[in-house]
Amino acid sequence: MQEFVDFMNGIIWSPFLIYLCLGTGLFYSIITRFVQVRLIGEMWRLLFSGKGSDKGISSFQALAVSLSGRVGTGNIAGVAAAIGFGGPGAIFWMWIVAFLGAATAYVESTLAQIYKEEQDGQYRGGPAYYFEKCLGQKWFAWLFAITTIFACGVFLPGVQSNAIANAIENTLGSGQTIETVMGALSYTKIVTATVVVMVLGFIIFGGVKRIANFTQIVVPFMALAYIIIACVIIALNIDILPEVISLIINDAFSPMAGFGAAIGWGVKRGVYSNEAGQGTGPHAAAAAEVDHPAQQGLVQAFSVYIDTLFVCTATAFMILITGAYNVHGMVEGTFLVQNLGVDVAANSPAFTQAAIEYVMPGVGNPFIAFALFFFAFTTILAYYYIAETNIAYISRTLKIPGLTFILKIVIMSATFYGCVKTANLAWGLGDMGVGLMAWLNIIGILIIFFISRPAIKALKDYEEQRKQGVDKYTFDPVKLDIKNATFWEDRLKNDKQD
């Protein structure tokens, strides 16, 4: 199984996809005149200005749901893996993909708002919806929807739950070994898997509102606590910080692990963490209640900064400042840098736990276990919501009774399986899911640009209204020559009648 997964990832994550992610971000940065820099103040204002409704969630709730998908294992174990396999220079490429990816995130999230629908009393949208309505290619929309259901429902949850289980096992020990149909499993992992699955079931059977209410409280609190701990460690070692930054930048262009390894691991883990271009963020963006599609696009662009430039950077600085890392060589079992034991897995939270333990003995293991539980758990919730949205898309045409219930059982099973199996297999399956979605979404949004440029038209319209100082923003897709934006056409008609 591991060999097959590695083979598939070698194809999916070829250098072409790496440069496609970077190139698309650069392309949209230029086209939008670097919207991620020009309108950063507006992003902050919009973050707290929107309100929810019976059918939609607020901008902040939508940000929290999408951040719950972004801020997860990738920020702790993913950063460690980037350093462990790509060297310190991989962090530089994570920064680059985040900066450029913020423009991509604006585009895909604005598209999701433009082409969203009202289904079963709530807003639904995402790549499948905008591929059908803007491209007019239903087969391509279905391909994305089915890929996403498998990626978010089967492949990706295991990465998150695996990190939770590993962090708790590092803290409490493995306990007794129990023989099961899945082989010999540690008692700690079995108990962890059971608790995680029980809590997950309680929340996902409560619907999207319960997910939004849970994540808007947990995600900001845990992210802030994590960054504060990181800042304390950095402050205690501030004299080393310039040396660490120099190491990252120098290694980005003359990397110890090879230039391809630094870029490849930096971009792969960057996309995995901030999800810009992957096509997951637009699902939460579509659920937001806003006056203009560009508003949520800007909020989602800001979430990329929070994820990578804040949380991932905090992790990287902690690991590099304390020297709590190894860098693997090209030949298995060899190391270019070895500061920790050979049995310390790079695809795990162990580097980060060791970094905090180095400065705060007795704190690192339990704190990372606690943080990862909430980060990874809320990410699993986001995956469920994304998979459910794509099932809702398919159900518009093909009504299969009980499909959502089956998804709930499958994602709970995948979560349990991820808790008890090895990290490398879990990450490999997760990379497959991320890569397949990224291929489809990035190609799709590039074709959409050359056909009709709806996200760019929406940005221009929003900026014009902003200059005019309007009291309330409006969006008229017909005036902008944007076709099939039926939700906004109907809303405009209703507003005029009122």
Image (tube, rainbow, N blue to C red):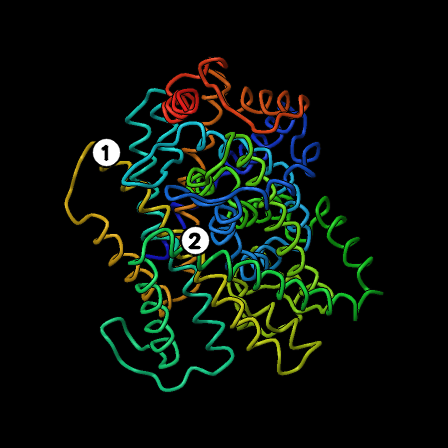
Q: Say which amino acid is labelled 2.
A: Ala
In the picture, the quarter occupied by the N terminus is bottom left
In the picture, the quarter occupied by the C terminus is top left
Q: In the rendered structure, which disc, 2 or 1, sits on the residue that comes first in sequence?
A: 2
User: How many marks on residues?
Assistant: 2
Identified at 79% across, 71% down, the residue is 236
Q: Tell whether 292 sits left or right of 239.
A: left
- Give the farthest residue toward the right: 239
Q: Which residue is mark 1?
A: 396
Q: Which residue is mark 2?
A: 212
Check disc 2: other Cα within 10 Å, few if <14, some if 14-19, many if 20+: many
Q: Label 1, secondary structure: give it.
A: loop
Q: Nearer the viewer, residue 414 or 38?
A: 38
Q: Tell whether 452 sits left or right of 362.
A: left
Q: Alpha-carbon distance for marks 2 and 1?
A: 24 Å
x and y percent of residue 496 in the render?
A: 43, 20
Q: Nearer the viewer, residue 105 or 288?
A: 288
Q: Label 2, secondary structure: give it.
A: helix
Q: Say which amino acid is labelled 1.
A: Arg
Identified at 60% across, 48% down, the residue is 266
x and y percent of residue 285 in the render?
A: 47, 40
x and y percent of residue 125 in the render?
A: 38, 35
Identified at 64% across, 61% down, the residue is 315
x and y percent of residue 37 in the render?
A: 70, 35
Q: Tell whether 202 sits left or right of 277.
A: left
Question: In which quadrant of the rendered view does residue 328 lie?
Answer: bottom right
